[in-house]
Image (spheres, rainbow, N blue to C red):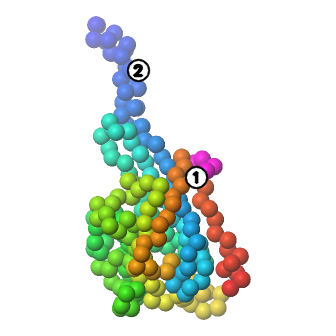
Amino acid sequence: MIFSAFSRAYKPVIASLMLLFTSGCASYYSHFAMFPAENSSGEPRHVRLSWQSAEYPGWWIAGDKATSVKVETQCSDRVWRLRDGADSGDCGTGIRACGEPGKDRLAGTGLPATGSNRCMSINPADQDARVASLGGQLELLVSCTPAVVTEGQGDDTRNLDYLRASSVPYTVYVRKAPRGSMRARLPEFDESVCDAE
């Protein structure tokens, strides 16, 4: 009888604690950047980076998490996804994207890139870099060029060009906003530039 009364009195407290521990108290953010550059053909383009993150308080058992970094070039259908960890391919460590056979060439030699060649990397000097730890400034190194810049013919033509390779990383300044807020909306590309060409 005493246990029954004790159980009823503390049931709401226990339920509240369980809810607290299962939610994890994460804060969710959108990260993005857009900067002007040239594609491999030398045309002026805007490049957009974006990813999402979940940040947990220091006392919580789970570490911060993040999606892959999406890299898009204005007027192009080619989308790169830079990842960290073991599922990121066999082209090294850190935050990277590996080459795709038949789609990429190594910028330094012009040789075809393979899955063991790193074509893009973020903060390349930091082999332990993780997407979840990225701050308001990052370095993006591009080491490949597209094997072909267009695919198909006529109305079915797809542009596969992307950010020009460089031996020096691009310095990129990133904005961070709570996910779902007005400030978290991605900047849009001006597609009229593509139509004009």
Along the line of sight, the residue nearer the viewer: 88 or 110: 110
Residue 53 placement (x, y as % from top left): 44, 52
Residue stretch rendered in magenta on the structure? 180-184
Residue at 60% from the left image edge and 87% from the top image edge: 157
Residue at 54% from the left image edge and 62% from the top image edge: 33
Residue 12 numbered tag: 2
Q: Quadrant of the N terminus?
A: top left
Q: Is residue 183 magenta?
A: yes
Q: How many marks?
A: 2
Vertical arrangement, residue 54 with respect to residue 157, above or below:
above
Along the line of sight, the residue nearer the viewer: 158 or 136: 136
**Horizontal arrangement in the rendering, residue 26 relative to residue 3 (left or right):** right
Residue at 45% from the left image edge and 84% from the top image edge: 145
Mark 1, secondary structure of its residue: helix
Residue 121 placement (x, y as % from top left): 38, 70
The residue type indicated by label 1 comes to Ala
**Horizontal arrangement in the rendering, residue 182 relative to residue 136 (left or right):** right
Mark 2, secondary structure of its residue: helix
Along the line of sight, the residue nearer the viewer: 190 or 143: 143
Residue 58 placement (x, y as % from top left): 34, 39
Residue 117 in view, yes or no: yes
Q: CA distance from mark 1 to mark 2?
A: 36 Å
- The residue identified by callout 1 is 184
Residue at 41% from the left image edge and 82% from the top image edge: 144
Within-10-Å neighbours for mark 2: few <14, some 14–19, many 20+: few
Residue 23 placement (x, y as % from top left): 41, 38
